[in-house]
Image (cartoon, rainbow, N blue to C red):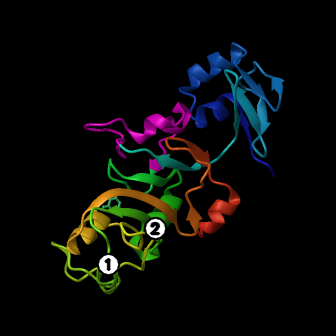
Amino acid sequence: MAKKLTLERIIHQQGFGARKLCRIMIRNHEVTVNGLACDEPYAEFDLDKLHYTVQGEAWDYREKSYLMLHKPSNYECSHKTQHHPTIYSLLPHPLVVRDVQCIGRLDEDTTGLILISDDGQFIHRMSSPKHKVAKTYEVRCKHPVDDSQIAQILKGVQLIDEDAPIAALACTRISEHVIHMTLTEGKYHQVKRMVAAISNRVEALKRIQIGDLQLPHDLAVGHWRWLSDSDMAKLGAI
Ligand code: URA
């Protein structure tokens, strides 16, 4: 049987604030459901394919949130930032209230694909070292990258504080200074440290793929979108 909830509870659970505030917004005619006005907080609605608006903004009911963000440079991936704005300031407030978390942090000067969710199981699945989800980075290096450097990255480089050499799953040269590197771990500053270990230096770093999911070309820097079923399949999540 389809699950039903009161409108007040739905709006509250979707991140629009305390239940009392949600009640007030509903009574103030600030909420519509499936195209119809509803000013009764205790009216019950079927959660399946529920569309609603709050203060004119359209939403679909989502039990859990799954999204991707094109991270800009000079944003930090934590809630309490030190020097730069947080990536969470790029998301609508209700999602932040729902306590979405980014899956694996990027450095403040790294750009590109970040997954964000409030589903603990999904976060664990995508970030646990056991699952070895591949992440591909586009790396612009200070000095030209030669074949022997690519070979070293594929064979494994010794990083300070690591017991054994670490190898990339894949590493290809795109141009004289640009390589694509695929890693299955997410160690601290891993790409920068691996590139330093081959006597080069990262000048720009962008994550372009997670699993089989590529950063879409039409997702502008600083913008986010919901993950579709096909995106979730590319992540191996469904
Ligand atoms: N490796 C790094 O060095 N930095 C990142 O942000 C991600 C991977």
**Please, is residue 128 above or below residue 61 in the view?**
below
Residue identified by numbered label 1? 146
Q: Residues within 10 Å of mark 2 (few under 14, many from 20)?
A: many
| Residue in front for this viewpoint, 23 or 66 | 66
Looking at the picture, tell me which residue is in the foreground, 1 or 201: 201
Q: Is residue 77 magenta?
A: yes
The reply, left or right, for residue 87 in relation to residue 223 is left
Residue 188 in view, yes or no: no
Q: Position of residue 139 (x, y in %)?
A: 38, 63
Determine the residue positioned at 50% across, 44% down: 221
**Residue 67: image x %, image y %?**
57, 50
The residue located at (15%, 72%) in the rendering is: 160
Q: Position of residue 105 (x, y in %)?
A: 37, 54
Residue 192 in sight here: yes
> Disc 2 residue type?
Thr
Q: Position of residue 234 (x, y in %)?
A: 62, 67
Amino acid type, label 1 = Asp
In this image, 3 relative to 189: left or right?
right
Magenta highlight range:
74-101
Q: CA–CA distance between discs 2 and 1?
A: 19 Å
Q: Is residue 192 left or right of residue 123?
A: left
Residue 136 marker: 2
Q: Quadrant of ligand 1?
A: bottom left
